[in-house]
C-alpha cells in the first residue's frame, strides 16, 4: 500500500463518515434544522458533518486495529480453518453480548434488544456477500467478523445509552465507513502495475 492510496482511503472514509452524520440529522432532526433561519440549517449541517467525521476516525482506528489483530491471529493460528471457526464463535459471542448486556442493564422486553444485533448482522452478511463477489470466497468470514464484531465494539458508547437517536446517529456513519473500508481494501492493497 502506498502513502497515496492510504491518503485516498483515509479522506474518502472521512467524507463518508461526514455524509453519514448529515443523513442521520436530515432523517431524525429535519424539523430542528428547518425551524430557524438558513444560518441555523447550515450550522446544524456543519456540526453533523463534523460529528460524522469524528465517528469515521473511530472507524478507521477500529479498521487498523482489526488489520493488526488479523495479522497476529494468522501467525498464532497456523490452521486457517481453526481461525475461521474462532471468528464465527466471536461473532456469535458478540451477538449474545449485544442482547444480554443491554437487557441486563436497561430491562424491559428481551425481544427489543434483538433489533440492533439482527440489523447489524443483516448488514454484515450483505457486506460479506458483496466482498466475496468482488474478491473470493475466503474473504467471507473475515468480512463478517470485521463488520459485526469490530462495528459492535466501535458502537459501544452509543449502545450504553437507551436512546434510538444516539444509537443510530453513531451506527450510520460507522456502517458507511466500515463498509467502504472493507470493500476498498483489496483495491488499495493491489500492487501497482
Image (tube, grey):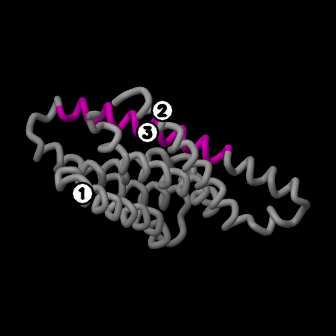
User: Bounds of the magenta span?
Assistant: 50-74
List x then y, in percent, for residue 149.
36, 49
* Numbered tag placed on residue 104 in the rendering: none
Quarter holding the C terminus? top left
* Between discs 1 and 2, the one toward the N terminus: 2
Helix, strand or loop status at disc 2:
helix
User: Exactly how many numbered labels are in the figure?
Assistant: 3
Helix, strand or loop status at disc 1:
helix
* Numbered tag placed on residue 132 in the rendering: 1
The reply to whether residue 173 is in sight is yes
Residue at position x 86%, y 55% from top? 40
Residue at position x 90%, y 62% from top? 36
Q: Which residue is mark 2?
A: 7
* Residue at the top extreme, as displayed: 3
Q: Which residue is mark 3?
A: 62
Q: CA distance from mark 1 to mark 2?
A: 25 Å
Of badges 3 and 1, the one in the foreground is: 1
Q: CA distance from mark 3 to mark 1?
A: 21 Å
Q: 72 or 4: which is nearer to us?
A: 4
Residue at position x 41%, y 46% from top? 181
List x then y, in percent, for residue 33.
80, 62
* Between discs 2 and 3, the one toward the N terminus: 2
List x then y, in percent, for residue 143.
30, 51
Of badges 2 and 3, the one in the foreground is: 2
The reply, left or right, for residue 155 in relation to residue 95 is: right
* Residue at the right extreme, as displayed: 37
Q: 96 or 142: which is nearer to us?
A: 142
Asked if residue 65 lies in the magenta stretch, the reply is: yes
Amino acid at each position: 500500500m502506498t502513502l497515496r492510496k492510504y491518503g485516498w482511503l483515509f479522506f474518502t472514509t472521512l467524507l463518508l463518515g461526514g455524509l453519514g452524520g448529515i443523513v442521520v440529522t436530515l432523517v431524525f432532526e429535519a424539523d430542528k434544522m428547518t425551524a430557524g433561519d438558513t444560518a441555523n440549517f447550515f450550522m446544524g449541517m456543519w456540526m453533523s458533518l463534523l460529528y460524522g467525521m469524528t465517528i469515521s476516525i473511530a472507524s478507521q482506528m477500529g479498521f487498523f486495529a482489526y488489520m493488526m489483530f488479523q495479522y497476529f491471529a494468522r501467525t498464532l493460528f497456523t490452521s486457517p480453518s481453526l481461525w475461521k471457526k474462532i471468528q464465527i464463535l466471536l461473532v456469535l459471542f458478540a451477538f449474545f453480548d449485544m442482547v444480554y448486556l443491554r437487557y441486563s442493564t436497561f430491562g424491559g422486553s428481551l425481544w427489543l434488544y434483538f433489533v440492533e444485533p439482527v440489523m447489524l448482522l443483516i448488514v454484515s452478511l450483505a457486506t460479506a456477500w458483496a466482498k466475496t463477489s468482488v474478491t473470493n470466497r475466503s474473504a467471507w468470514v473475515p468480512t463478517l467478523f470485521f463488520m459485526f464484531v469490530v462495528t459492535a465494539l466501535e458502537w459501544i458508547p452509543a449502545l450504553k445509552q437507551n436512546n434510538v437517536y444516539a444509537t443510530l446517529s453513531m451506527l450510520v456513519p460507522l456502517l458507511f465507513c466500515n463498509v467502504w473500508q472493507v470493500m476498498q481494501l483489496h483495491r488499495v492493497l493491489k500492487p501497482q502495475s
